[in-house]
Image (cartoon, rainbow, N blue to C red):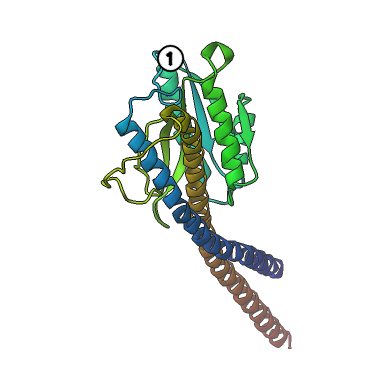
Amino acid sequence: MGAQMRVYRQRVKSVQATKKITRAMELIAASRVVKARQRVLASAPYTHALTQALSALATYSNEEHPLTTEPEEVRRAGLVIIAGDRGLSGAYNSSVLREAESLSRKLREEGKDIVPYLVGNRAVNFYKFRRRDSAARWGGFSDQPTHEAAKEIGDRIVADFSRGYDDGGLDEVHVVYTRFSSMVVQEPRALRLLPIQVVEDDAEDTPGDKDVLPLYEFEPSVGQVLDQLLPQYVVARIWTCLLSAAASQMAAQQRAMKSATDNADALIKTYTRLANQARQAEITQEISEIVGGANALAKAK
């Protein structure tokens, strides 16, 4: 009985140590999610201004560009999957990977070849485990993405899209990431990135859909302006997706660690009660043995 009580007490100490870790991780995630959300909001004015300029271009000119031209036949599609570098974030990674798998099946059913571009170690490990190939991999910045990383990803995608099909180029590009709506709601989302459709449908983009578009004058020409703006627009969209995914990951981690802390509290109470019951049973047994011994001695006399 004493051994059983010691086991329960050891388990209480173990769970208490785990609780300290999960509580610390919860507080860290809570502070980081605020900063991540602020970064999303800080990036919105630039994205909005760039989107507005491209909307004006689309409205006031008939200029065609390789990044906006719809192909006659879509045979190869790029798929950018933005996941996390680490776990302990609840269903965050599994949800975005499940959304990516669903989109992959849909594209394959349409007769398109899939070329994956993986962002985040969880996405990389997901493909490694299944022995699947990928065109490019990035990782190490999921919780604090940098604009340099977004530019590297965007430049690679634009370069691959600009190549012809026979040279291994892409006909269209899709992005799967987790959209941050609130601390409670984060949802995996798929959007088509290329060919470019200038839209402002993200919560991360500042309101302004109904603004009157300004009349721009383009120097030296509309084509050259598009050559500069369109790649920047792709990078801006990737950057917004990375920031939204980072905020979603931190929010999911905070909820997961709070749930783990609450479960640790419940386990500590359960093991403490069991240890007390074991101690009580041990004391009762000792008293019974003493009483039994005293009765035996009395009868012997």
Kindly give the residue lying farthest to the top in the view shown.
Answer: 166
In the image, residue 87 sits, relative to residue 196, either above or below, namely below
The answer to whether one can see residue 185 in this image is: yes
In the image, residue 156 sits, relative to residue 241, either above or below, namely above
SS category of the residue bearing label 1:
loop
Q: Residue at x 29, y 45 (%)?
A: 209
Residue 300 rendering spot, x and y as whole percentages: 73, 84
Viewer-nearest residue: 40 or 20: 40
Residue 3 rendering spot, x and y as whole percentages: 71, 67
- Left or right: residue 105 versus residue 35 is left
Q: Quadrant of the C terminus?
A: bottom right
Q: Residue at x 52, y 63 (%)?
A: 30
Query: Identity of the amino acid at label 1?
Result: Gly
Q: Residue at x 33, y 37 (%)?
A: 56
Give the image quarter of residue 110: top left
Residue that label 1 marks: 111
In the image, residue 280 sits, relative to residue 12, either above or below, namely below
- Left or right: residue 125 versus residue 236 is right
Viewer-nearest residue: 89 or 272: 89
Q: Quadrant of the N terminus?
A: bottom right
The answer to whether one can see residue 123 in this image is: no
Viewer-nearest residue: 219 or 283: 219
Residue 114 rendering spot, x and y as whole percentages: 51, 21
How many other residues sit within 10 Å of disc 1, few (<14), some (14-19) or many (≥20)? few
Q: How many marks?
A: 1
Q: Residue at x 56, y 71 (%)?
A: 273
